[in-house]
């Protein structure tokens, strides 16, 4: 898929890949998308991408958010969230960096798993948000 007018072809900072079928994921990605550096960060649903290009599978992208940095390294789950926050700059950047350091990273990993497992119960969710056990 070709990037839209607001999506850089090759982002200089990274790319946030989310589940576009999940209402909660889409709402969260949209929140980030309104705050990102549009010329440096792409925000795209996995359904609109060639996942092989990023070394990701459909199963991986259905179960967690992914951040692909400018060097092509993949970061999933809470690590993706921390990278996205860091890319926002300002105080968000500090929060993102802190989420990668223990013990905050341990708490972030647990919180991410809890949210991911229950995303179908959160505001903006739909039946498509439910993850199969």
Image (cartoon, rainbow, N blue to C red):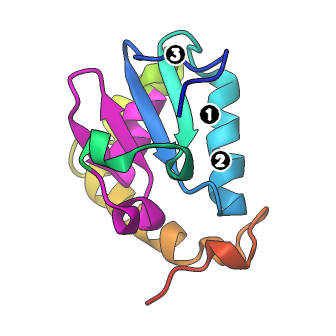
Residue wearing tag 2: 28
Q: Which mark is residue 106?
A: none
The alpha-carbon separation of the residues under discs 2 and 3 comes to: 20 Å
Sooner in the amino-acid sequence: mark 2 or mark 3: 3
Say whether residue 126 is left or right of residue 64. Answer: right
Q: Viewer-proximal residue, 75 or 51?
A: 51
Q: Position of residue 10 (x, y in %)?
A: 40, 16
Q: Position of residue 119 (x, y in %)?
A: 61, 71
Q: Position of residue 84 (x, y in %)?
A: 45, 32
Q: Position of residue 73 (x, y in %)?
A: 20, 35
Q: Secondary structure at mark 1?
A: helix
The residue range painted magenta reads 56-85
Residue wearing tag 3: 8
Residue wearing tag 1: 32
In this rendering, is residue 28 above or below 117? above
Is residue 122 something that shows in the picture? yes
Tell me the quarter of the picture where residue 20 sits.
Answer: bottom right
């Amino acid at each position: 898929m070709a990037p839209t007018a607001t999506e850089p072809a090759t982002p200089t900072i990274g790319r946030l890949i989310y589940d576009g079928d999940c209402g909660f994921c889409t709402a969260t990605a949209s929140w980030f998308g309104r705050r990102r550096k549009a010329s440096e960060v792409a925000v795209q649903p996995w359904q609109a991408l060639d996942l092989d290009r990023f070394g990701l599978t459909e199963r991986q992208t259905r179960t967690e958010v992914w951040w692909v940095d400018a060097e092509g390294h993949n970061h999933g789950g809470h690590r993706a969230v921390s990278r996205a926050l860091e890319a926002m700059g300002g105080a968000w950047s500090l929060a993102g960096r802190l989420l990668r350091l223990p013990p905050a990273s341990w708490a972030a990993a647990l919180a991410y798993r809890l949210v991911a497992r229950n995303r179908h119960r959160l505001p903006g969710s739909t039946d498509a948000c439910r993850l199969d056990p």
